């Protein structure tokens, strides 16, 4: 590989280093992708930097989000090597043989533009401190977080949500079987052909849940959590074939089209401009009734997960809430209710609304910190 | 057979483009003296000659597809020329395009091969009186004569040169099919129990497209070169309109492109792609319009907006905004 990359400025070593750099920045680059990158660089040979950028991008990325991330990495890496490391050349040379890649990559991360999250630590202790911060933040309640922690947590959360989505995608059952032949129906169907089994009938297997319908409470009492939960939902949608997402406070707003096939930051920007009554009052029963009235077709008993994210503080009548939730439950495979308050030590679901809803819920879980959200994975 | 008789994947053939032979040899030959940069240039200009306006990023990826022989996965919104890419690619290489349109429930028997059951049954009846042994009869009814080749099998059975295999809207097929595809893309061989294993003589160039209606499996994505196609810039879209509709007047073209670019910023549920721009421009020309005005917008609304609520949103935006005044 080495001999084929003739360009003196971009050697195989640089490519490998860049791959490692990109991986530390969150791009899913494994050995396989690194080898692919080397091949691509070899095929492109010396020439325009742009071509190399486009080529590496097509090898190392596998989604639009990766694509954005790649651009950042490429800028940071190559700008750094040209501007920063040229004056520091002797220093880099010294360490070249042994620890070069780890060292330079790390110094690049700390000098990088958006590496706010760990900027206070210095190189040596960074890994250890990073881990403990992560630990602490994952357990911290969203509502008690400081602004600075919030940003750090967001970075960690986005990465973990992504990993979770990827894990879920990997866990898909691999099978090409078509189900068993239904002999009875096959024979019945083929009587007109004189009993020759020309058109076979099959018995279908019960499908995995493919649809996710989510209702997120954005009323005042939920406001410390709702921003975070929106991001969680955004990450989640990749796992399902059909995702329908709604926000509600006193009424229901569908935000599915804002989410579909978009970048997170674009979706969030549009979301903030929505006239949806952020931090207003709550009518859970009323919103559910609205859902049942206009959107009940989105529910299919075989393969729908219904996810409700709310603290259960309802100003409406508990009877309505119970009746509407019962209607939903009849039409879905599983009702999951996530309640941030469940994370509080002495919380009991005793509010009228919550206790009315409980009998119709299959999974009742907390959603107050990162850990609890990630724990949801086993129900999906 | 099952429940979806009649829904047979479409397959499209394109005429090879003889003018591009120079590019083909330049790009695909191992011992070419041209540098990678020159090859990429050649691909850009070759595509342009075929009426497919592209940028360097896509052309570089296409170049890598021919060099590394990996599949290319193209993602992007509807109407931005993902399918066109495969057609142009096939014409550029002067080879056959084999297309597999994916849909929910697509299975191996409509994507790979199927035995022609009816014909087999008929053959058994006809041969009932013959003196052939059972083995001979069996060999006969499981021969090529009774095999219905579907796109994937066709693509690996190409005799003379590598075809381009377009697997369109892979996100609409289910995971089981995706897993099967993964296997095919790594070995390029298909096993038919009654006949044995068929290995590709010429490994096809594979183009996969996706509208991102669901996330594809990790393994499949990692096997592919990735290309995201975004909405084109004003300048690029102008070039596309000029290339595809050479007889359009410059002023009308600029107005239409500006109008569509404004509409894209209105957060519609189905934003118009380049295909819609071309539709709209063509509609205006058919109506004999010399310029875009309120009436023209109203009359060609159907080519831009594909949903009732989008209609309303465009109308609410106000004519002066739409006409860029």
Image: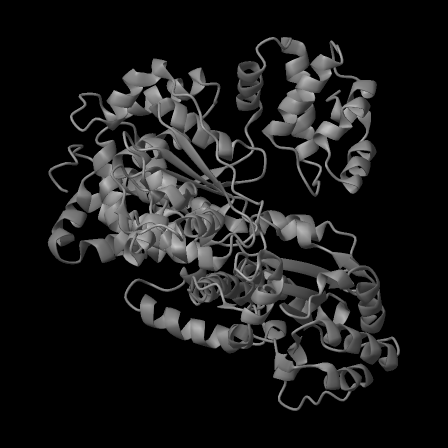
> Is residue A260 rendered to the left or right of residue B173?
right
The vertical placement of A43 against B7, above or below, is above
Answer whether residue B52 is visible to the viewer in this image.
yes
Q: In the rendered view, does B246 fall on the left or right side of B43?
A: right
- Residue at screen point 47% across, 76% down: A136
Q: Is residue B290 above or below residue B134?
A: above
What is the quadrant of residue B249 in the picture? top right
Q: Residue at x 24, y 57 (%)?
A: A102
**Nearer-the-camera pick, B89 or A290:** B89
Relative depth, front residue between A243 and B24: B24
Q: Between A85 and A163, which is closer to the camera in this rendering?
A: A163
Q: Is residue A184 above or below residue B255?
A: below
Q: Residue at x 63, y 10 (%)?
A: B248
**In the depicted view, which residue is nearer to us: A316 or A192?**
A192
Residue A78 at x, y = what percent? 31, 40
Q: Quadrant of residue B7?
A: top right
Residue A163: percent from left, percent from top? 44, 64
Q: Residue at x 39, y 52 (%)?
A: B129
């Amino acid at each position: 590989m080495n001999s084929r990359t003739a360009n003196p400025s971009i050697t195989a070593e640089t490519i490998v280093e860049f791959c490692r750099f990109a991986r530390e920045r969150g791009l899913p680059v494994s050995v396989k992708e690194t080898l692919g990158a080397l091949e691509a660089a070899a095929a492109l040979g010396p020439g325009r930097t742009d071509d190399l950028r486009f080529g590496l991008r097509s090898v190392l990325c596998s989604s639009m989000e990766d694509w954005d991330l790649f651009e950042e990495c490429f800028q940071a890496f190559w700008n750094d090597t040209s501007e920063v490391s040229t004056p520091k050349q002797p220093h880099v040379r010294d360490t070249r043989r042994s620890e070069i890649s780890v060292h330079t990559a790390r110094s690049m991360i700390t000098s990088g533009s958006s590496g706010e999250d760990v900027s206070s630590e210095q190189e040596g202790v960074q890994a250890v401190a990073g881990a403990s911060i992560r630990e602490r933040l994952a357990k911290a309640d969203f509502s008690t977080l400081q602004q600075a922690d919030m940003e750090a947590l967001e970075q960690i959360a986005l990465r973990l949500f992504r990993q979770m989505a990827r894990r879920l995608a990997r866990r898909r059952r691999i099978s090409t079987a078509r189900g068993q032949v239904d002999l009875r129906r096959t024979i019945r169907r083929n009587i007109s052909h004189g009993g020759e089994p020309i058109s076979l009938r099959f018995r279908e297997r019960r499908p995995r849940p493919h649809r996710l319908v989510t209702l997120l409470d954005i009323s005042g009492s939920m406001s410390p959590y709702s921003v975070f939960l929106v991001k969680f939902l955004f990450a989640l949608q990749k796992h399902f074939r059909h995702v329908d997402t709604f926000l509600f406070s006193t009424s229901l707003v569908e935000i599915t089209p804002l989410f579909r096939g978009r970048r997170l930051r674009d979706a969030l920007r549009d979301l903030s401009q929505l006239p949806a009554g952020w931090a207003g009052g709550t009518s859970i029963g009323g919103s559910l009734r609205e859902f049942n009235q206009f959107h009940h077709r989105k529910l299919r008993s075989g393969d729908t997960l219904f996810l409700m994210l709310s603290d259960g503080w309802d100003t409406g009548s508990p009877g309505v809430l119970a009746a509407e939730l019962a209607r939903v439950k009849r039409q879905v495979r599983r009702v999951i209710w996530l309640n941030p308050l469940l994370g509080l030590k002495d919380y009991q679901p005793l509010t009228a609304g919550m206790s009315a809803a409980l009998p119709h819920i299959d999974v009742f879980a907390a959603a107050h910190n990162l850990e609890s959200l990630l724990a949801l994975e086993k129900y999906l | 057979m099952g429940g979806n008789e009649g829904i047979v994947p479409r397959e499209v053939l394109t005429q090879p483009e003889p003018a591009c032979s120079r590019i083909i040899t330049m790009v695909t030959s191992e011992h070419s003296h041209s540098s990678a940069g020159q090859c990429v240039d050649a691909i850009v200009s070759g595509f342009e000659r075929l009426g497919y306006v592209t940028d360097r990023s896509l052309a570089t990826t296409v170049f890598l597809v021919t060099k590394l022989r990996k599949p290319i996965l193209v993602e992007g919104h509807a109407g931005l020329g993902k399918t066109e890419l495969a057609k142009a690619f096939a014409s550029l290489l002067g080879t056959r395009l084999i297309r597999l349109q994916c849909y929910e429930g697509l299975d191996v028997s409509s994507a790979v091969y199927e035995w022609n059951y009816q014909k087999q049954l008929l053959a058994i009846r006809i041969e009932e009186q013959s003196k052939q042994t059972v083995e001979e009869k069996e060999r006969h009814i499981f021969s090529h004569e009774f095999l219905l080749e579907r796109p994937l099998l066709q693509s690996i059975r190409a005799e003379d040169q590598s075809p381009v295999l377009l697997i369109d809207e892979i996100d609409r097929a289910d995971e089981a099919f995706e897993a099967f595809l993964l296997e095919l893309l790594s070995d390029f061989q298909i096993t038919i129990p009654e006949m044995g294993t068929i290995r590709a003589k010429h490994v096809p160039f594979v183009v996969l497209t996706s509208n991102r209606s669901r996330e594809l499996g990790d393994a499949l994505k990692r096997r592919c070169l990735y290309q995201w196609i975004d909405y084109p810039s004003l300048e690029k879209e102008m070039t596309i309109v000029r290339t595809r509709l050479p007889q359009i007047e410059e002023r009308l073209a600029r107005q239409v492109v500006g109008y569509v670019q404004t509409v894209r910023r209105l957060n519609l549920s189905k934003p118009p792609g380049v295909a819609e721009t071309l539709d709209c421009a063509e509609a205006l020309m058919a109506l004999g319009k010399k310029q875009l005005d309120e009436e023209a917008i109203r009359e060609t609304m159907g080519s831009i907006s594909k949903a009732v609520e989008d209609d309303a949103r465009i109308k609410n935006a106000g004519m002066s905004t739409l006409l860029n005044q």
